[in-house]
Image (cartoon, rainbow, N blue to C red):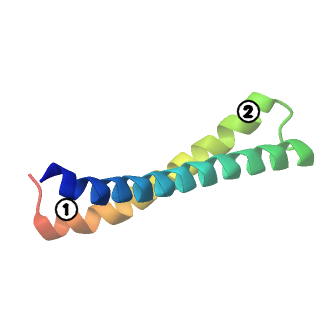
């Protein structure tokens, strides 16, 4: 029975890996883009500060999206 489901599981693992790679790659691209923008415009002079600011912005957006999805689920199915 395990041999029957092995190709299906491998296919699903491949799809999930591609989705994770796309999401993480996009987040890294956005962080690098905003870091370069902050440095080129002269808003900040430190590379560390120019890297931390986009990381915090991306993290904030991520947390807002999680809350936006998690809130209706909690209200629908209840919570303690």
Question: Residue 48 is drawn in which quadrant?
Answer: top right
Q: Is residue 8 above or below residue 59?
A: below
State the CA–CA distance, disc 1 to disc 2.
Answer: 36 Å
Q: Residue at x 58, y 50 (%)?
A: 58
Q: Which residue is mark 2?
A: 49
Mark 1 secondary-structure assignment: helix
| Residue 11 relative to residue 55: left or right | left
Q: Residue at x 66, y 36 (%)?
A: 52
Which quadrant: the N terminus? bottom left
Of marks 1 and 2, which one's residue comes earlier in the chain?
Answer: 2
Using the image, tell me which numbered label, if any, was put on residue 74: 1
Few, some or many C-alpha atoms within 10 Å of disc 2 (few <14, some 14-19, many ≥20)? some
Q: Nearer the viewer, residue 50 or 5?
A: 5
Residue 23, given in percent of the width and then of the height, sits at 53, 54
| Residue 59 relative to residue 63: left or right | right
Few, some or many C-alpha atoms within 10 Å of disc 1 (few <14, some 14-19, many ≥20)? few
Residue 8, given in percent of the width and then of the height, sits at 29, 60
Q: Residue at x 61, y 42 (%)?
A: 55
């Amino acid at each position: 029975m395990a041999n029957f489901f092995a190709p299906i599981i491998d296919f699903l693992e491949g799809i999930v890996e591609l989705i994770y790679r796309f999401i993480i790659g996009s987040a890294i691209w956005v962080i690098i883009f905003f870091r370069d923008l902050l440095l080129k415009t002269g808003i900040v002079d430190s590379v560390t500060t120019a890297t931390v600011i986009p990381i915090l912005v991306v993290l904030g957006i991520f947390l807002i999206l999680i809350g936006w999805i998690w809130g209706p689920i909690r209200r629908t199915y209840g919570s303690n």
